[in-house]
Amino acid sequence: MGIKNCYSMNLISKSITLSALCVLIFFGCKNKSGSHFDFDKYHKKHEKSPVIKSLKTYITTTDSANPNAKEILTAATEYNSKGLKTKETHYTEDSGKVEYTTETKYDDNGNAIETHSVYPISNYESTEKNTYDKDKHLLSTDWSRTDGTSGRHEYKYDSHDKMVKWDWYEKGKFVISRLYYYNYDKEGRPIECVCKETKNNKDTQTDCHEKYAYDSITGLESGKIVLIENEVPLEIVESQYDSAGDKIMEIHYDRDSVGKLLPDARTINIFNEFGDIRQSVVFKGDKEQSTTDNTYDQYGHLIESITRSDAGTRRTRNVYEFY
């Protein structure tokens, strides 16, 4: 992943906790402020959904060698009457065995205050306990594992609710800090993000640098440039929207073997009248790589997704139970 991903933690062990990773993904450089574009003005509204009680996901993968492959349960999720996820079980696609199970407890404000994960195949468990401020920002995570490791993460935010500092401790000792520096436009949207890491709170190493542009009509992100040393673009992501605010195309530009920045992958989306993606077609160069067709229920929940490519067909089926 390296510098290409603004929230990669290549200097930290792969045993990163789930809560910390989610914080980096949600509050890291890629996160942006919402648009003021009136999306509902151009789309029909789904029926109001009952509260989901459970969700089971099944996957079937067929190809020329396995044309009659069986459907496999890959995930089962339980929710409480408030719609909060309380238990999640993931299964391996090859054997159907439990890969891991995570149970979550919440406070009265809906904040996840404790999660406990069990990995039966490797006989491994982990626990995380979180604290929040009055604005529901995650302030700290204390984690422990059955392998004897333990630690603490602490987070700080700016006035735009972006995480600007993440401190990592193990067994009471400081390990590393990740720092985020943002520049915003007059609409309060991030137009530049630089993330750095320090092991002594003094000397820093730049780990990522990104710049953003926004669509003039919808206000949604229309461009992202990932930079390396000397402001050289490493990757560009371009997004195009129609007048209804639907992202109809996304183009990824990457450097080739000689360093030239070229279009690498292109995704074209077709939407239904509700603004849900009905079909996505991925191209690499001029060659079509895959086509995905989605089906939704009357509430807008994805109930089936079928992806076809030269490698075969992958069908994902979601089954919901409601309160």
Image (cartoon, rainbow, N blue to C red):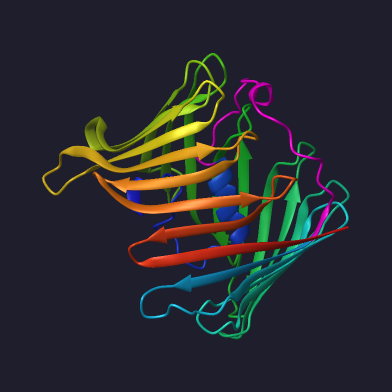
How far across and down, in percent of the image, does residue 169 sit?
56, 59
Q: Is residue 241 left or right of residue 49?
A: left
Q: Nearer the viewer, residue 93 or 155?
A: 93
Give the main secondary structure of the magenta stretch: loop
Q: Is residue 139 above or below residue 273?
A: below
**What residue is rendered at 47% in x and 52% in y?**
292
Q: Is residue 99 above or below residue 16?
A: below
Q: Is residue 215 left or right of residue 255?
A: right
Over which residues does the magenta segment extend?
28-53
39 is within the stretch colored magenta: yes
How far across and down, in percent of the image, does residue 276 sit?
60, 40
132 is within the stretch colored magenta: no
Residue 5 shows in this picture: no
- The image quarter containing residue 274 is top right
Q: Is residue 212 left or right of residue 174?
A: left
Which quadrant is the C terminus positioned in?
bottom right
**What residue is rendered at 53% in x and 30% in y?**
246
How far across and down, in percent of the image, does residue 67 sit?
43, 77
Residue 235 shows in this picture: yes
Q: Is residue 66 above or below residue 150?
A: below
Q: In the rendered picture of this protein, how many numbered marks are placed on residues?
A: 0
Q: Residue furthest left?
A: 258
**What residue is rendered at 82% in x and 41% in y?**
48
How far across and down, in percent of the image, does residue 208 sit?
37, 41
Which quadrant is the N terminus positioned in?
bottom left
Q: Nearer the viewer, residue 247 or 293?
A: 293
**What residue is rendered at 71% in x and 50% in y?**
297
Q: Residue furthest top?
A: 186
Q: Nearer the viewer, residue 150 or 302?
A: 302
